[in-house]
């Protein structure tokens, strides 16, 4: 298995502004050693660490950690899209072997259309040029804008995080679920878009269950197919709902009806391809 989505953080660092004491299960320092100890029983030998702060200092720290830990096969960082030196900043990060792309924290930006800024065109073109990934940390209401980006930049590798964070409440007749299905179908038609199978368990309104998650999982796999779906744990955020072991077991159970090759695609092959993992 390749874990395409995990975080590490130190609560002493000032740039984790979203981490507050009321998030009792997350308001702790989680180190790379903590992650390796957690994942060792599952044989995780390749993983992608994802930014958790809107600060390039965190990205630089993650790149340093990656240099000293072979388990990390790539870093998805953060850059200030609105900076006058954004291209220079991006090019500086490209020099790091483990740097794989960027993730603006769109879910936390009040203006849902913020990403449509025409000034960002140069950034997307630079990402395309360097074969870098644009990871979309979004909610359902951002999908239309990401569809526009996928259409405009056909060579840009886009990864939808956490299935676009649908509200999983068991009501499949609700217009929100129907709209999410429609948008997932539409965005999947763009072959430069991949969907990350992570974070779904934390979107469950009630206690997570296989029954509630299945319709969302089936929708993602139906339209993206196993060749454009990748698995991630979203550790330690997943701890809000379950343990790492429980999410691994649930994921394997949810995918058990697929052919072995399809399972291998989701857990290993597709990740190797999109993140260009050599070993």
Image (cartoon, rainbow, N blue to C red):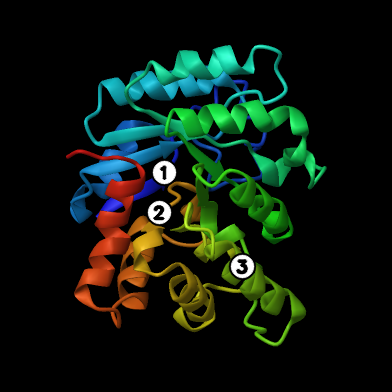
Of pointers 2 and 1, the one earlier in the residue sequence = 1
Residue at horizontal 63 percent and vertical 18 percent from the top? 86
Mark 2–mark 1 contact, CB under 8 Å?
Answer: yes
Label 2 to label 1: alpha-carbon separation: 6 Å
Q: Which residue is mark 1?
A: 6
Residue at x 51% of width, y 31% of height = 127
Residue 44 image position (x, y, % from top left):
23, 48
- Closer to us: 28 or 115: 115
For residue 233, which numbered disc appears in the image? 2
- State which tag comes first along the sequence, 1 or 3: 1
Up-down relation of residue 241 to residue 75 (above or below): below
Left or right of 168? Residue 234 is left
Which mark is first along the chain, 3 or 2? 3
In the image, residue 176 above or below residue 13: below
In terms of secondary structure, where does tag 3 sit? helix
The residue shown at (67%, 84%) is 171
Task: Classify mark 1: helix, strand or loop.
Answer: strand
The residue that mark 3 highlights is 186
């Amino acid at each position: 298995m390749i874990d395409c989505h995990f975080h590490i953080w130190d609560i002493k660092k000032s740039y984790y502004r979203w981490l507050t004491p009321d998030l009792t299960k997350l308001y702790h320092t989680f180190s790379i050693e903590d992650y390796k100890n957690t994942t060792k029983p599952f044989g995780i030998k390749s993983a992608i660490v994802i930014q958790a702060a809107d600060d390039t200092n965190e990205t630089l720290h993650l790149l340093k950690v990656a240099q000293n830990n072979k388990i990390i096969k790539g870093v998805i960082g953060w850059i200030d899209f609105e900076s006058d030196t954004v291209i220079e900043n991006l090019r500086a990060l490209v020099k790091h072997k483990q740097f794989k792309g960027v993730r603006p924290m769109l879910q936390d930006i009040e203006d849902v259309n913020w990403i449509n800024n025409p000034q960002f065109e140069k950034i997307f073109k630079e990402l395309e040029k360097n074969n870098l990934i644009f990871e979309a940390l979004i909610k359902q209401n951002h999908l239309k804008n990401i569809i526009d980006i996928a259409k405009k930049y056909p060579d840009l590798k886009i990864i939808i995080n956490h299935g676009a964070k649908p509200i999983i409440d068991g009501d499949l007749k609700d217009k929100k679920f129907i709209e999410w299905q429609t948008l997932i179908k539409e965005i999947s038609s763009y072959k430069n878009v991949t969907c990350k199978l992570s974070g779904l368990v934390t979107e469950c309104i009630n206690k997570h269950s296989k029954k509630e998650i299945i319709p969302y999982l089936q929708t993602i796999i139906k339209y993206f197919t196993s060749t454009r779906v990748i698995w991630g744990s979203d550790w330690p955020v997943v701890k809000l709902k379950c343990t790492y072991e429980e999410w691994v077991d649930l994921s394997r159970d949810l995918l058990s009806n697929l052919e072995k090759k399809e399972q291998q695609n989701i857990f290993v092959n597709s990740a190797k391809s999109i993140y260009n993992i050599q070993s």
